[in-house]
Image (spheres, helix red, strand yellow):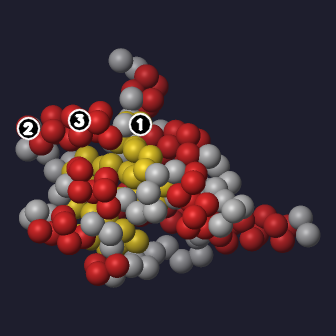
Amino acid sequence: MKLVDAISKKIFSLQELQKQVASWRVTNKTIAFTNGCFDILHEGHIFSLTEAAKEADFLIIGVNSDSSVKKIKGPERPINNEKSRSLLLSNLAIVDAVIIFNEDTPLELIIALLPDVIVKGGDYTIEQIVGSKEVIANGGRVVINPIVEGFSTTGIIQLIKSSYS
């Protein structure tokens, strides 16, 4: 199979991803999970995802659905729809699986998958990270990556808007 053919196979439904996770676990592989809107992919995202990928054999990304992003970020977001955001992420070599979730948080998804590691950016504490209690109770761990200053989707949007004002 060509690498190009594999890209679309990285985007999973929950049922498909649970089967995939089970097959990875049979071979004693570890699974890292991170999540976010990833509305406009930037250097800060790439750094965070690269660091997350180092934490386990496989990296799963939970992507907020369009309706979820609107609730969190406001009515003008997302800039890119959930299909586009998932497709971009699935094209990254460091990403093994992408799944869209509709809820405000990925708690249900984390409970269903029980990854070995949850990875989030440095703007969170362990107590604030959704699913951390469940993963730790299951013998997993939580990793907080440093933030790359100067990179944010909101900042990029503001820069674009100010360029056209």
Task: Decide which of tag 1 and tag 3 comes sooner along the chain.
Answer: 1
- Where residue 17 appears, as percent x and y from the top left, is 29, 38
In what element is the residue under mark 1? strand
- Where residue 121 appears, as percent x and y from the top left, is 40, 71
Q: In which quadrant is the C terminus drawn?
A: bottom right
For marks 3 and 2, give the CA distance: 10 Å
Kindly check if marks 3 and 2 are in contact, taking CB atoms under 8 A apart as contact: no
Residue at the image position 21 percent from the left and 34 percent from the top: 19
Q: Amino acid at mark 3?
A: Gln
For marks 1 and 3, give the CA distance: 11 Å
Quadrant assignment, res 52: bottom left
Residue 26 bears which disc, if any?
2
Farthest residue to the top: give it.
Answer: 1
Q: Which residue is mark 3?
A: 20
In what element is the residue under mark 2? helix
Q: Which residue is mark 1?
A: 11
Residue 6 horizontal side relative to residue 64, left or right: left
Circle 2 packing at 10 Å, graded few (<14), some (14-19), many (20+), is few
Depicted 98 relative to depicted 10: above or below: below
Q: Amino acid at mark 2?
A: Val
Residue at the image position 78 percent from the left and 64 percent from the top: 160
Q: Closer to the camera, 122 or 133? A: 133
Q: Is residue 31 visible?
A: yes
Q: Closer to the camera, 80 or 1? A: 80
- Where residue 133 appears, as percent x and y from the top left, is 20, 72
